[in-house]
Amino acid sequence: MLAETRDIQTHAGYCPCCRGRTTFTIHGPWLRDEYLCDRCHSIPRQRHLIRILDTQFPRWRWSTMHESSPSLPILAKQCWRYSYSHYLPDVAPGTKKDGVRCESIEALTFADNSLDLFVTQDVLEHVFHPDRALSEIHRVLKPGGAHVFTAPKHEALAVTRCRATIADDGSVDYLLPEEYHGNPVGDGKALVTWDYGSDFERIASEWVGDTVATYQTVDRQQGIQAAFNEVFVIVKR
């Protein structure tokens, strides 16, 4: 693994995100967050997602795309019909606060069959009802449209497990010790609600009724190498 090759800290390559020759720098052992493009500061999962868009959906720049909870404005710079949203607890879904649209992916306000592409990056492990979220995203896609996304998949975990549930009054029941990831809005912390295991593709396919394709890539020349770096694609039939 590159993370264990401590004498290699920088190398030249081509970044799919900023579309140019660059230097990639390893800032720490956790490549998923610390293996950066010096030009655009993208991380491996972002570069992998762009690569999958390029290879599987070559006209994505001209598609109607929505991204939930973006952390870096890469897609906004390249897609002509791009929109984005964050979940803002104190804002009505479908409305805006300070120019930012509020959407809950468990109950989207978009019309049926209205989007070509829906992108989520490390979002599904933070929702309480991923079955609803995937079904809602599938609903708003046009036939032939696709949900392109990342989510940590734990290969050593045989069965997907829920870490926390939420009651009608908003109280949270923690089934496992609390774990948080970074959040681009709010207090900067997002509770991890699900750990996805090796059965993830099967159960996700059952939730939406369509096949989940998994892409695994290791390409150092494009800075694509890290743990939990799969990109998943669900195409709506």
Image: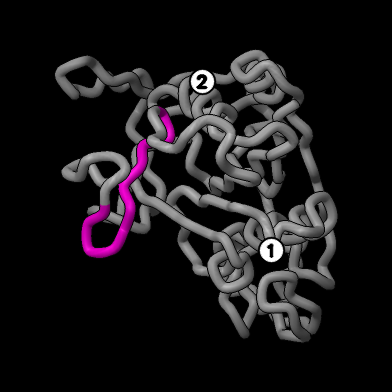
x and y percentages locating residue 37 in the rendered image: 64, 77
Q: Is residue 66 left or right of residue 129?
A: right
Image quarter in which the N terminus is found: bottom right
Name the residue located 48 percent from the left edge and 42 percent from the top edge. Answer: 123
Asked if residue 138 is positioned above or below residue 147 in the image, the reply reads above
Q: Nearer the viewer, residue 39 or 101?
A: 101
x and y percentages locating residue 135 in the rendered image: 54, 23
The colour scheme used here is: one colour
Quickly name the residue at label 2. Answer: 131
Query: Which residues fall within the magenta stretch?
Result: 96-106
Q: Which is in the foreground here, disc 2 or disc 1? A: 1
Residue flagged by tag 2: what amino acid is it?
A: Asp
Quickly name the residue at label 1. Answer: 61
Q: Quadrant of residue 126?
A: top left
Question: Badge 2: how crowded within 10 Å, few (<14), some, or many (20+)?
Answer: some
CB of mark 2 within 8 Å of CB of mark 1?
no
Q: Say if residue 127 shows up in the picture.
A: no
Q: Quadrant of residue 53?
A: bottom right
Q: Main secondary structure of the magenta part?
A: loop
Q: Is residue 156 left or right of residue 183?
A: right
Asked if residue 128 is positioned above or below residue 167 in the image, the reply reads below
